[in-house]
Image (cartoon, grey):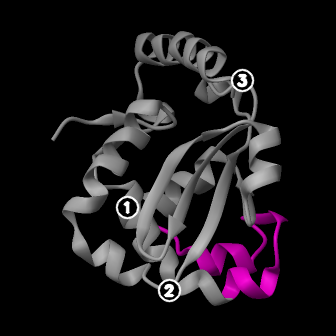
Amino acid sequence: METARYCTPEWLEACAKGYPEKPRFAEEFQKLIMVVCFRVNAEPAWGIEKDILFGAQIDKGQLLKLVFYSEDEAYKDADFILTATPQEWKKILRKENKFLTDFMLGKILLEKGSKVKVVSLAPHSTTLVDVLTQVPLQFQDEMTPEELEAYRAYSREFRQRLGV
């Protein structure tokens, strides 16, 4: 399986494509109807020049969307917006840290939505991490200087193209 760069359209597309191939995802999300967005805070050293938002729209087990969102789209569509540094999201996606623990410790902030509902949805966070890690990920702090510069240029291009 080909490695995907973190925070790229290819990463989200690969995860969305793999979703229907794993029936347990739909089973575990069967009772959920939500849009959840994740804000990755700007980190110029990682080639993330300004905050970027991606999110998932789930409707009774079906993954309707796994895409980048503009600021306006996220605020209009999302039930929840969760915010953290790229380093924190990396720890979650590498399964070094647990979502609920880091949320309760304030390492992941709730920007939009109900804290009570987020906590009640926390048992599904492991499954969502599994959805987002179906492909091996390369994070920016693991890139060579040349790869990081290529990511930076590509990020500017796709963000402009997608309006995010």
Q: Is 163 located above or below residue 142 in the figure?
A: above
Q: Is 121 located above or below residue 73 in the figure?
A: below
Q: Which mark is residue 62?
A: none
The disc, 2 or 3, on the residue closer to the chain's N-terminal end is 2
| Residue 97 sits inside the magenta stretch | yes
Separation (CA) of disc 2 from disc 3: 37 Å
Separation (CA) of disc 1 from disc 2: 17 Å
Q: Residues within 10 Å of mark 3 (few under 14, many from 20)?
A: some
Magenta-highlighted residues: 96-119
The disc, 3 or 1, on the residue closer to the chain's N-terminal end is 3
Residue position marked by numbered label 3 in the rendering: 49
Q: Is 48 located above or below residue 17 in the figure?
A: above
Residue drawn at point x = 35 percent, y = 43 percent: 137
Residue drawn at point x = 46 percent, y = 32 percent: 9
The disc, 1 or 2, on the residue closer to the chain's N-terminal end is 2
Q: Residues within 10 Å of mark 2 (few under 14, many from 20)?
A: few
Q: Nearer the viewer, residue 161 or 137?
A: 161
Quadrant containing the C terminus is top right
Q: Is residue 142 left or right of residue 7?
A: left
The part of the image, by quadrant, that contains residue 132 is bottom left
| Residue 89 sits inside the magenta stretch | no
The part of the image, by quadrant, that contains residue 121 is bottom right
Single out the residue that lies furthest toward the left: 1
Residue position marked by numbered label 2 in the rendering: 31
Residue position marked by numbered label 1 in the rendering: 131
